[in-house]
Image (cartoon, helix red, strand yellow):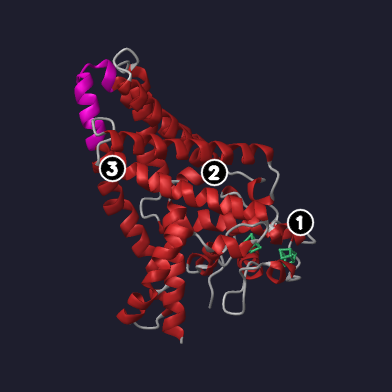
Amino acid sequence: MAKVDLKFGKKLKKFGAIDFNACYNCGTCTAVCALSDEKDSFPREMVRFSVTGLSEDVKGSLKPWLCYYCGECTTYCPQEAKPGELMMSLRRYATSRYDWTGLSGLLYKNLLAYIISFLLVIAGVIGAYLSDTFTTEEWFHYGHYFEMLAIVGVFLLILTPNIFRMWLYSVQSKKKGFKLKHYFSAFGELLVHMFTQKRTLKCDDDAKNKIWWFEHFILVFGYLALLFTTVVLDWFATEVPFIIYMGYVFSGIIFIVTFDFVIRRIRKRSEKSTFSHPSDWFFVIWLFLMGVSAFAVRLLVDTGLILDNFWVYLFHVIILVQWALIIVPFGKWTHFLYRSFAMYFDKVNKLNAA
Ligand code: SF4
Ligand code: SF4
Protein backbone atom coordinates (compact mmCIF):
# COMPACT_ATOMS: atom_id res chain seq x y z
CA MET A 1 0.00 0.00 0.00
CA ALA A 2 1.24 3.47 -0.89
CA LYS A 3 2.73 5.40 2.01
CA VAL A 4 1.07 8.76 2.71
CA ASP A 5 3.16 11.67 3.97
CA LEU A 6 0.70 13.91 5.80
CA LYS A 7 3.18 16.80 5.87
CA PHE A 8 4.01 16.63 2.17
CA GLY A 9 1.90 19.68 1.24
CA LYS A 10 3.66 21.80 3.87
CA LYS A 11 7.06 20.56 2.71
CA LEU A 12 6.32 21.43 -0.92
CA LYS A 13 5.42 24.99 0.02
CA LYS A 14 8.95 25.38 1.32
CA PHE A 15 10.18 24.30 -2.10
CA GLY A 16 8.13 27.04 -3.77
CA ALA A 17 4.74 25.37 -4.48
CA ILE A 18 1.86 27.83 -4.23
CA ASP A 19 -1.87 26.99 -4.44
CA PHE A 20 -2.02 23.39 -5.62
CA ASN A 21 -4.57 22.41 -2.93
CA ALA A 22 -7.15 24.47 -4.84
CA CYS A 23 -7.12 21.79 -7.58
CA TYR A 24 -10.51 20.11 -8.16
CA ASN A 25 -9.11 17.51 -10.56
CA CYS A 26 -10.74 18.75 -13.77
CA GLY A 27 -7.83 17.69 -16.01
CA THR A 28 -7.62 20.93 -18.02
CA CYS A 29 -3.90 21.25 -17.24
CA THR A 30 -3.14 17.83 -18.74
CA ALA A 31 -5.33 18.54 -21.76
CA VAL A 32 -3.53 21.81 -22.61
CA CYS A 33 0.01 20.57 -21.91
CA ALA A 34 1.78 20.06 -25.25
CA LEU A 35 4.30 17.67 -23.67
CA SER A 36 1.81 15.40 -21.96
CA ASP A 37 0.66 12.27 -23.83
CA GLU A 38 -0.88 8.90 -23.08
CA LYS A 39 2.43 7.38 -22.02
CA ASP A 40 3.54 10.37 -19.95
CA SER A 41 0.46 12.06 -18.60
CA PHE A 42 1.00 15.15 -16.40
CA PRO A 43 0.69 17.54 -14.59
CA ARG A 44 -2.68 16.52 -13.07
CA GLU A 45 -1.25 13.25 -11.80
CA MET A 46 1.56 15.14 -10.05
CA VAL A 47 -0.96 17.55 -8.52
CA ARG A 48 -2.91 14.54 -7.19
CA PHE A 49 0.24 12.95 -5.74
CA SER A 50 1.06 16.24 -4.04
CA VAL A 51 -2.43 16.81 -2.63
CA THR A 52 -2.70 13.24 -1.32
CA GLY A 53 0.81 13.14 0.17
CA LEU A 54 2.34 10.45 -2.09
CA SER A 55 5.87 11.74 -1.66
CA GLU A 56 7.54 8.40 -2.52
CA ASP A 57 5.68 8.29 -5.85
CA VAL A 58 6.93 11.80 -6.60
CA LYS A 59 10.47 10.78 -5.68
CA GLY A 60 10.36 7.84 -8.10
CA SER A 61 8.71 9.74 -10.93
CA LEU A 62 10.55 11.36 -13.83
CA LYS A 63 7.51 13.42 -14.86
CA PRO A 64 8.51 16.62 -13.02
CA TRP A 65 11.55 16.67 -15.34
CA LEU A 66 9.53 16.05 -18.50
CA CYS A 67 7.84 19.45 -17.99
CA TYR A 68 9.73 22.37 -19.55
CA TYR A 69 7.71 25.04 -17.76
CA CYS A 70 5.92 26.88 -20.55
CA GLY A 71 3.20 27.86 -18.06
CA GLU A 72 0.21 26.95 -20.30
CA CYS A 73 -1.32 24.73 -17.60
CA THR A 74 -1.15 27.57 -15.07
CA THR A 75 -2.74 30.00 -17.53
CA TYR A 76 -5.71 27.69 -18.19
CA CYS A 77 -6.25 26.22 -14.72
CA PRO A 78 -9.78 27.34 -13.68
CA GLN A 79 -8.87 27.09 -9.99
CA GLU A 80 -5.62 29.07 -10.22
CA ALA A 81 -3.87 26.08 -8.63
CA LYS A 82 -0.68 26.94 -10.56
CA PRO A 83 0.27 23.41 -11.70
CA GLY A 84 3.27 24.74 -13.67
CA GLU A 85 4.78 26.21 -10.51
CA LEU A 86 4.02 22.98 -8.66
CA MET A 87 6.05 21.09 -11.29
CA MET A 88 8.94 23.49 -10.64
CA SER A 89 8.78 22.91 -6.91
CA LEU A 90 8.58 19.12 -7.46
CA ARG A 91 11.84 19.33 -9.40
CA ARG A 92 13.43 21.08 -6.42
CA TYR A 93 11.94 18.48 -4.08
CA ALA A 94 13.21 15.61 -6.27
CA THR A 95 16.66 17.23 -6.34
CA SER A 96 16.71 17.32 -2.55
CA ARG A 97 15.82 13.59 -2.43
CA TYR A 98 18.57 12.64 -4.90
CA ASP A 99 21.22 14.60 -2.99
CA TRP A 100 22.89 12.30 -0.46
CA THR A 101 24.39 15.21 1.49
CA GLY A 102 21.02 16.82 2.28
CA LEU A 103 22.47 20.23 1.45
CA SER A 104 20.28 20.80 -1.65
CA GLY A 105 17.14 20.48 0.48
CA LEU A 106 18.57 22.73 3.18
CA LEU A 107 19.48 25.47 0.70
CA TYR A 108 16.23 25.24 -1.30
CA LYS A 109 14.12 25.53 1.85
CA ASN A 110 16.16 28.06 3.73
CA LEU A 111 17.29 31.36 2.22
CA LEU A 112 19.33 32.16 5.33
CA ALA A 113 21.40 28.98 4.84
CA TYR A 114 22.13 30.14 1.27
CA ILE A 115 23.21 33.57 2.46
CA ILE A 116 25.38 32.16 5.26
CA SER A 117 27.15 29.81 2.83
CA PHE A 118 27.84 32.71 0.46
CA LEU A 119 29.17 34.82 3.35
CA LEU A 120 31.45 31.99 4.50
CA VAL A 121 33.04 31.88 1.05
CA ILE A 122 33.56 35.67 1.06
CA ALA A 123 35.16 35.46 4.53
CA GLY A 124 37.37 32.54 3.45
CA VAL A 125 38.69 34.24 0.30
CA ILE A 126 39.22 37.66 1.92
CA GLY A 127 40.80 36.00 4.98
CA ALA A 128 43.22 34.08 2.76
CA TYR A 129 44.12 37.30 0.92
CA LEU A 130 44.68 39.31 4.11
CA SER A 131 46.80 36.53 5.62
CA ASP A 132 49.35 37.06 2.82
CA THR A 133 49.65 33.30 2.38
CA PHE A 134 49.92 33.59 -1.42
CA THR A 135 51.66 35.99 -3.76
CA THR A 136 49.58 37.47 -6.57
CA GLU A 137 51.17 35.01 -8.98
CA GLU A 138 50.19 32.13 -6.72
CA TRP A 139 46.62 33.45 -6.54
CA PHE A 140 46.34 33.05 -10.32
CA HIS A 141 48.06 29.70 -10.21
CA TYR A 142 45.92 28.23 -7.44
CA GLY A 143 42.74 29.82 -8.83
CA HIS A 144 43.28 27.73 -11.94
CA TYR A 145 43.97 24.57 -9.92
CA PHE A 146 40.88 25.23 -7.84
CA GLU A 147 38.73 25.15 -10.99
CA MET A 148 40.12 21.78 -12.02
CA LEU A 149 39.84 20.27 -8.55
CA ALA A 150 36.32 21.63 -8.01
CA ILE A 151 35.05 20.14 -11.27
CA VAL A 152 36.50 16.68 -10.60
CA GLY A 153 35.57 16.72 -6.88
CA VAL A 154 31.98 17.88 -7.37
CA PHE A 155 31.35 15.37 -10.15
CA LEU A 156 32.88 12.43 -8.31
CA LEU A 157 31.69 13.12 -4.80
CA ILE A 158 28.32 14.79 -5.27
CA LEU A 159 26.80 14.59 -8.75
CA THR A 160 27.68 11.01 -9.70
CA PRO A 161 26.29 9.46 -6.49
CA ASN A 162 23.20 11.67 -6.81
CA ILE A 163 22.53 10.53 -10.38
CA PHE A 164 22.97 6.95 -9.18
CA ARG A 165 20.31 7.59 -6.53
CA MET A 166 18.03 9.14 -9.15
CA TRP A 167 18.47 5.96 -11.22
CA LEU A 168 17.70 3.77 -8.19
CA TYR A 169 14.47 5.63 -7.48
CA SER A 170 13.21 6.07 -11.02
CA VAL A 171 14.48 3.05 -12.98
CA GLN A 172 15.76 0.30 -10.71
CA SER A 173 12.74 0.50 -8.39
CA LYS A 174 10.44 -0.39 -11.32
CA LYS A 175 11.88 -3.94 -11.10
CA LYS A 176 11.94 -4.54 -14.83
CA GLY A 177 15.39 -6.15 -14.78
CA PHE A 178 18.66 -4.71 -16.04
CA LYS A 179 19.01 -4.80 -19.84
CA LEU A 180 22.28 -3.22 -20.85
CA LYS A 181 21.30 -2.92 -24.51
CA HIS A 182 18.47 -0.54 -23.55
CA TYR A 183 20.98 1.78 -21.90
CA PHE A 184 23.03 1.82 -25.10
CA SER A 185 20.01 2.32 -27.37
CA ALA A 186 18.72 5.21 -25.26
CA PHE A 187 22.08 6.93 -24.77
CA GLY A 188 21.50 9.38 -27.64
CA GLU A 189 18.58 10.88 -25.67
CA LEU A 190 20.99 11.94 -22.94
CA LEU A 191 23.33 13.79 -25.30
CA VAL A 192 20.62 15.35 -27.45
CA HIS A 193 18.69 16.74 -24.51
CA MET A 194 21.79 17.81 -22.62
CA PHE A 195 23.14 19.89 -25.50
CA THR A 196 20.02 21.03 -27.36
CA GLN A 197 17.07 21.10 -24.90
CA LYS A 198 15.01 20.67 -28.09
CA ARG A 199 11.95 19.55 -26.13
CA THR A 200 11.44 23.20 -25.15
CA LEU A 201 10.39 23.89 -28.76
CA LYS A 202 7.50 21.43 -28.46
CA CYS A 203 6.39 23.05 -25.23
CA ASP A 204 5.18 26.25 -26.85
CA ASP A 205 5.65 27.17 -30.50
CA ASP A 206 5.31 30.95 -30.34
CA ALA A 207 8.19 33.20 -31.45
CA LYS A 208 9.06 34.30 -27.90
CA ASN A 209 9.61 30.68 -26.85
CA LYS A 210 11.85 30.08 -29.87
CA ILE A 211 13.97 33.11 -28.94
CA TRP A 212 14.13 31.88 -25.34
CA TRP A 213 15.23 28.43 -26.56
CA PHE A 214 17.92 29.95 -28.81
CA GLU A 215 19.28 32.12 -25.98
CA HIS A 216 19.32 29.14 -23.65
CA PHE A 217 21.08 27.06 -26.31
CA ILE A 218 23.88 29.58 -26.86
CA LEU A 219 24.16 30.12 -23.10
CA VAL A 220 24.84 26.39 -22.57
CA PHE A 221 27.31 26.45 -25.47
CA GLY A 222 29.01 29.64 -24.16
CA TYR A 223 29.20 28.26 -20.61
CA LEU A 224 30.73 24.93 -21.62
CA ALA A 225 33.11 26.65 -24.05
CA LEU A 226 34.28 29.16 -21.40
CA LEU A 227 34.78 26.31 -18.96
CA PHE A 228 37.00 24.57 -21.51
CA THR A 229 38.86 27.82 -22.32
CA THR A 230 39.59 28.70 -18.69
CA VAL A 231 40.17 25.21 -17.24
CA VAL A 232 41.90 23.39 -20.10
CA LEU A 233 43.43 26.29 -22.05
CA ASP A 234 44.21 28.42 -18.96
CA TRP A 235 42.66 31.61 -20.41
CA PHE A 236 43.92 34.08 -17.77
CA ALA A 237 47.55 33.02 -18.25
CA THR A 238 47.71 32.19 -21.95
CA GLU A 239 49.44 34.43 -24.49
CA VAL A 240 47.90 32.77 -27.55
CA PRO A 241 45.72 35.46 -29.24
CA PHE A 242 43.15 32.99 -30.59
CA ILE A 243 42.47 31.57 -27.11
CA ILE A 244 42.33 35.09 -25.64
CA TYR A 245 39.70 36.19 -28.19
CA MET A 246 37.73 32.98 -27.69
CA GLY A 247 37.55 33.67 -23.95
CA TYR A 248 36.27 37.22 -24.58
CA VAL A 249 33.56 35.93 -26.92
CA PHE A 250 32.38 33.14 -24.59
CA SER A 251 32.37 35.27 -21.42
CA GLY A 252 30.58 38.00 -23.43
CA ILE A 253 27.89 35.52 -24.51
CA ILE A 254 27.36 34.52 -20.89
CA PHE A 255 26.88 37.98 -19.45
CA ILE A 256 24.78 39.32 -22.33
CA VAL A 257 22.34 36.38 -22.31
CA THR A 258 22.09 36.16 -18.53
CA PHE A 259 21.49 39.92 -18.35
CA ASP A 260 18.48 39.39 -20.63
CA PHE A 261 17.27 36.51 -18.42
CA VAL A 262 17.52 38.70 -15.31
CA ILE A 263 15.53 41.47 -17.04
CA ARG A 264 12.83 38.95 -18.05
CA ARG A 265 12.49 37.78 -14.47
CA ILE A 266 12.19 41.38 -13.28
CA ARG A 267 9.59 42.30 -15.94
CA LYS A 268 7.55 39.08 -15.47
CA ARG A 269 5.98 39.35 -18.90
CA SER A 270 5.56 35.61 -19.46
CA GLU A 271 4.35 32.82 -17.23
CA LYS A 272 7.83 31.26 -17.43
CA SER A 273 9.41 34.19 -15.62
CA THR A 274 6.59 35.20 -13.28
CA PHE A 275 7.52 33.11 -10.24
CA SER A 276 11.18 33.14 -9.24
CA HIS A 277 12.47 31.10 -6.32
CA PRO A 278 15.65 32.50 -4.68
CA SER A 279 17.61 29.66 -6.32
CA ASP A 280 16.46 30.92 -9.77
CA TRP A 281 17.79 34.39 -8.98
CA PHE A 282 21.09 33.08 -7.65
CA PHE A 283 21.57 30.97 -10.76
CA VAL A 284 21.16 33.75 -13.33
CA ILE A 285 22.84 36.50 -11.30
CA TRP A 286 25.89 34.40 -10.44
CA LEU A 287 26.25 33.26 -14.03
CA PHE A 288 26.08 36.89 -15.12
CA LEU A 289 28.70 37.88 -12.52
CA MET A 290 30.95 34.99 -13.61
CA GLY A 291 30.84 36.18 -17.23
CA VAL A 292 31.41 39.86 -16.38
CA SER A 293 34.16 39.28 -13.84
CA ALA A 294 36.05 36.79 -16.07
CA PHE A 295 35.87 39.28 -18.96
CA ALA A 296 37.09 42.12 -16.71
CA VAL A 297 40.01 40.10 -15.30
CA ARG A 298 41.32 39.18 -18.75
CA LEU A 299 40.88 42.78 -19.93
CA LEU A 300 42.94 44.02 -16.95
CA VAL A 301 45.61 41.38 -17.69
CA ASP A 302 45.77 42.52 -21.34
CA THR A 303 46.01 46.21 -20.40
CA GLY A 304 48.64 45.55 -17.68
CA LEU A 305 46.34 46.95 -14.95
CA ILE A 306 45.56 43.76 -13.06
CA LEU A 307 48.04 44.29 -10.20
CA ASP A 308 46.62 47.76 -9.45
CA ASN A 309 43.11 46.33 -9.55
CA PHE A 310 43.66 42.98 -7.91
CA TRP A 311 40.32 43.24 -6.11
CA VAL A 312 38.63 42.46 -9.45
CA TYR A 313 40.41 39.09 -9.52
CA LEU A 314 39.47 38.47 -5.87
CA PHE A 315 35.85 39.29 -6.71
CA HIS A 316 35.99 36.80 -9.58
CA VAL A 317 37.45 34.13 -7.27
CA ILE A 318 34.66 34.69 -4.72
CA ILE A 319 31.98 34.32 -7.41
CA LEU A 320 33.76 31.29 -8.85
CA VAL A 321 34.03 29.50 -5.49
CA GLN A 322 30.38 30.26 -4.62
CA TRP A 323 29.34 28.99 -8.04
CA ALA A 324 31.49 25.84 -7.97
CA LEU A 325 30.84 24.79 -4.37
CA ILE A 326 27.27 25.96 -3.77
CA ILE A 327 25.26 26.61 -6.94
CA VAL A 328 26.66 23.80 -9.12
CA PRO A 329 26.41 20.88 -6.66
CA PHE A 330 23.39 22.01 -4.59
CA GLY A 331 21.55 24.72 -6.54
CA LYS A 332 19.71 25.13 -9.80
CA TRP A 333 22.67 24.12 -11.98
CA THR A 334 21.83 20.46 -11.26
CA HIS A 335 18.62 20.88 -13.33
CA PHE A 336 20.83 20.78 -16.42
CA LEU A 337 22.04 17.33 -15.45
CA TYR A 338 18.93 15.80 -13.88
CA ARG A 339 16.66 16.86 -16.73
CA SER A 340 18.95 15.28 -19.33
CA PHE A 341 19.25 12.08 -17.30
CA ALA A 342 15.47 12.07 -16.78
CA MET A 343 14.97 12.02 -20.56
CA TYR A 344 17.49 9.18 -20.77
CA PHE A 345 16.01 7.15 -17.92
CA ASP A 346 12.50 7.73 -19.24
CA LYS A 347 13.52 6.21 -22.57
CA VAL A 348 15.18 3.27 -20.77
CA ASN A 349 11.97 2.70 -18.78
CA LYS A 350 9.92 2.72 -21.97
CA LEU A 351 12.27 0.22 -23.65
CA ASN A 352 12.19 -1.97 -20.53
CA ALA A 353 8.40 -1.92 -20.51
CA ALA A 354 8.00 -2.64 -24.25
S1 SF4 B 1 -6.41 22.50 -14.35
FE1 SF4 B 1 -6.15 23.16 -12.22
S2 SF4 B 1 -7.96 22.38 -11.17
FE2 SF4 B 1 -7.85 21.30 -13.14
S3 SF4 B 1 -6.70 19.38 -12.65
FE3 SF4 B 1 -5.20 20.90 -13.34
S4 SF4 B 1 -4.47 21.87 -11.44
FE4 SF4 B 1 -6.39 20.82 -10.96
S1 SF4 C 1 4.33 24.11 -17.50
FE1 SF4 C 1 3.97 23.58 -19.67
S2 SF4 C 1 5.13 21.69 -19.96
FE2 SF4 C 1 4.94 21.98 -17.76
S3 SF4 C 1 3.14 20.79 -17.19
FE3 SF4 C 1 2.46 22.89 -17.56
S4 SF4 C 1 1.81 22.94 -19.70
FE4 SF4 C 1 3.05 21.09 -19.41
Q: Look at the numbered disc 2 and give the secondary structure of its residue.
A: helix
> Which residue position is annotated with label 1?
80
Quick check: 178 left or right of 31? left
Q: Amino acid at mark 2?
A: Asp
> Which residue position is annotated with label 2?
280
Quick check: is 103 in the magenta stretch?
Answer: no
Task: Give the tally of numbered discs.
Answer: 3
Q: Nearer the viewer, mark 2 or mark 1?
A: 2
Q: Foreground residue, 46 or 304?
A: 304
Quick check: 162 left or right of 87? left
Residue drawn at (30%, 22%) of the image = 301
Quick check: is 135 in the magenta stretch?
Answer: yes
Determine contact: label 2, label 1, CB under 8 Å: no
Residue drawn at (31%, 34%) of the image = 244
Asked if one can make out residue 156 in the rendered structure from this viewpoint, the answer is yes
Asked if one can make out residue 11 in the rendered structure from this viewpoint, the answer is no
> Which residue position is annotated with label 3?
150
Label 1 beta carbon within 8 A of ligand 1: yes
Q: Where is residue 230, by image quadrant?
A: top left
